[in-house]
Image (tube, rainbow, N blue to C red):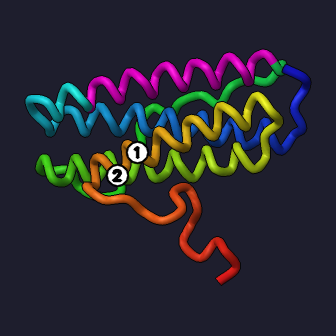
């Protein structure tokens, strides 16, 4: 990989921070689910750990210190049921989709490919947890200049 511009590294660091938050969040999600949904949450948790490690390696390869995980993260709402857990999982994936959309926009060839793949996966995961899709996953509401 050639040395990426500062903007690309900043987007990669943001995506890494989003992965850290998702990993924390999925530990909470999994604790409130059972059966097949819990197994799915565990598989997604593991996938996010792999993606986090991949991003950290790419950032470190550019002689930058990867953004560390926080000790804890504030959840956007109380998780008291399986329904809340599914809602949180969808919200986590939406956040990841936004971070990866920014990486696609800022990245060079290698980072853009990683970002596009991760964006597609996050959008599919969010739709699975939510039970419906959203238009233009990863773009903030009103991002089109509206």
Instruction: Find numbered disc 2 in the image and state the secondary structure of the residue it sits on.
Output: helix
Q: Are marks 2 and 1 in contact (CB under 8 Å)?
A: yes
| Residue 84 falls left or right of residue 21 | left
In the image, 104: left or right of 33?
Answer: right
**Which residue is at 46% across, 43% downward?**
122
Compared with 22, 77 (above or below) is: below
Considering the whole magenta stretch, tell me its main secondary structure: helix
In which image quadrant can residue 47 be found?
top left
Estimate the x, y position of residue 33 in percent, counting from the top left.
Answer: 14, 37
Toward the bottom, the furthest residue is 146
- Judged from the image, the secondary structure of the residue bearing numbered disc 1 is helix
Of the numbered discs in the image, which one, if any, rests on residue 124? 1
**Mark 1, residues whose alpha carbon is within 10 Å: few (<14), some, or many (≥20)?**
many
Q: Is residue 67 left or right of residue 65?
A: left
Q: Residue at x 9, y 32 (%)?
A: 34
Q: Which residues are magenta?
A: 41-61
| Residue farthest left in this picture | 35
Mark 2, residue position: 127
Q: Residue at position x 42%, y 42% from top? A: 73
């Amino acid at each position: 990989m050639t040395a990426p511009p500062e903007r690309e590294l900043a987007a990669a660091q943001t995506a890494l921070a989003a992965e850290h938050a998702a990993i924390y969040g999925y530990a909470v999600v999994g604790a409130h689910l059972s059966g097949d949904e819990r197994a799915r949450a565990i598989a997604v948790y593991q996938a996010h750990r792999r993606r986090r490690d991949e991003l950290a390696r790419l950032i470190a390869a550019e002689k930058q210190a990867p953004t560390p995980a926080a000790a804890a993260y504030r959840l956007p709402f109380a998780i008291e049921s399986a329904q809340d857990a599914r809602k949180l999982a969808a919200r986590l994936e939406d956040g990841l989709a936004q971070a990866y959309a920014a990486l696609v926009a800022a990245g060079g060839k290698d980072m853009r490919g990683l970002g596009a793949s991760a964006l597609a996966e996050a959008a599919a995961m969010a739709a699975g947890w939510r039970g419906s899709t959203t238009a233009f996953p990863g773009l903030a509401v009103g991002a089109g200049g509206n």
